[in-house]
Amino acid sequence: AYEWFKEMRKVSPVRYDEERQTWDVFCYEGAQKTLTDYKTFSSQMGGGEISLLGMDPPKHKLYRSIVAQAFTPISIEKMEPRIEQIARELLSARVARGEMDIIADLAFPLPVIVIAEMLGVPAEDRELFKKWSDALVADVDIAKGQTAMELLERKQKVAEDLYHYFGSVVEEHRKHPKDDLISALLQARIEEQSLDEQALLSFCLLLLVAGNETTTNLIGNAMLTFLERPQLMEKLRADRSLLPTAIEEVLRFRSPVQSLSRRVTTDTVLNGQQLKAGDRVIIWLGSANRDERQFENADQFMYKRHPNRHIAFGHGIHFCLGAALARLEARVALHTLLQQAPTMALRDSSTIQPLQSTFVYGYPAIPVTFN
Ligand code: HEM
């Protein structure tokens, strides 16, 4: 896709695709403008305001402020020791065995366990919860011979199960408040009203959907990028303070979220093109983050890149709420992996294929062996 993006940026950085009846924004400047101007480019996509992601101000601001406290850099920083402990536990058995799959054994379970603990999901339900959140985001299974329709139906069923499950967890928290996110959501008030059941449950689901697969893919994309560059791997191993800037570059170079959508509210001009009220717009973050007019040597992975104003977490009022958490989880996961695992190599690089998706960028499996 990156070759195609490059071509599109050159010939039509903002264009209308008749077939999909959609505008595509490929350039950095256009992407930033669209995301900044939330009045002209609405996040309400017609499916109703089901979650924060699909809300516009003023409602968006009210709802966002409720969960925002749990995600400030200070609240997130406090979680570091626990995240480290989880990463160590996940890794210890694998490293001894001499091989592992970066995705299944580390990048997938880590964010699921972290969010489950933040929300306050009882520890004994952790396995069940992991299975559900896996099924909910799996577009991987298309590759295993399922049709898109079967997958959709299965996802719907899983979403219903999860919904019911959260319902019972919430009930339990109502009776016995604890020091976690679900208890905080139960106490939250919007214009003196508490959140209705629907709003509360969609918050829980949103955190799962928005936070898990994306973070899994960031960790996987980072490991793959480093494994492909053995010299860089050695540098990072020797000096782990290089990790945060290298992770930012992974976010730019292999952006876990490739595209966002918006709906035009009033006729407007973007990059010389006339957009009409009601039109659908797809913003290609993956392309914007490779725009050579914004980034020098945009197609090169530069682990010390500075400045690096990528928009992998979006831009403007919907800027990713979980950005600090995702960065911390990625840093801890990679740090622990570099520390615990002796020299590492891809088991068979020819079998490593990206997920078939236009929304997310990641790999279903990254098998490695230890020397
Ligand atoms: C929003 C990316 C991890 C929660 C967003 C948006 C992007 C994004 C691009 C903007 C969506 C839009 O403008 O329509 C990512 C990436 C992640 C990541 C690349 C990992 C590398 C997380 C995590 C959480 C989270 C760990 C929470 C546990 C959210 C929420 C929103 C959001 C709640 C909606 C914010 C709003 O609408 O105001 N994310 N995300 N994300 N993200 Fe993330």
Image (cartoon, grey):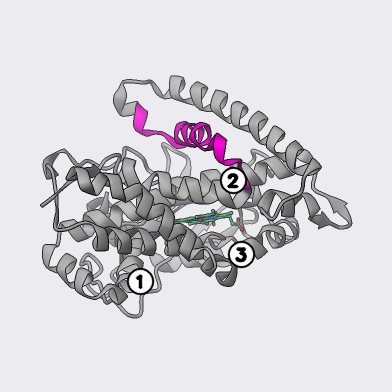
Q: What SS does tag 3 mark?
A: helix
Residue marked by disc 2: 206
Identified at 87% across, 52% down, the residue is 193
Q: Are marks 1 and 2 in contact (CB under 8 Å)?
A: no
Residue marked by disc 1: 244
Tally the marks. Answer: 3
Residue marked by disc 3: 317
Q: What SS does tag 1 mark?
A: helix
Mark positioned earlier in the residue sequence (1 or 2): 2
Residue 86 higher or lower than 152, as above or below: below
In the image, the segment drawn in magenta is 120-141
Find residue 299 and report its image quarter.
bottom left
Tell me if mark 2 has few (under 14), some (14-19) or many (20+) residues whose alpha carbon lies within 10 angstroms of its own.
some
The CB of the residue at mark 3 lies under 8 Å from ligand 1: yes
The location of residue 314, given as percent across then percent down, is 49, 61
Mark positioned earlier in the residue sequence (3 or 1): 1
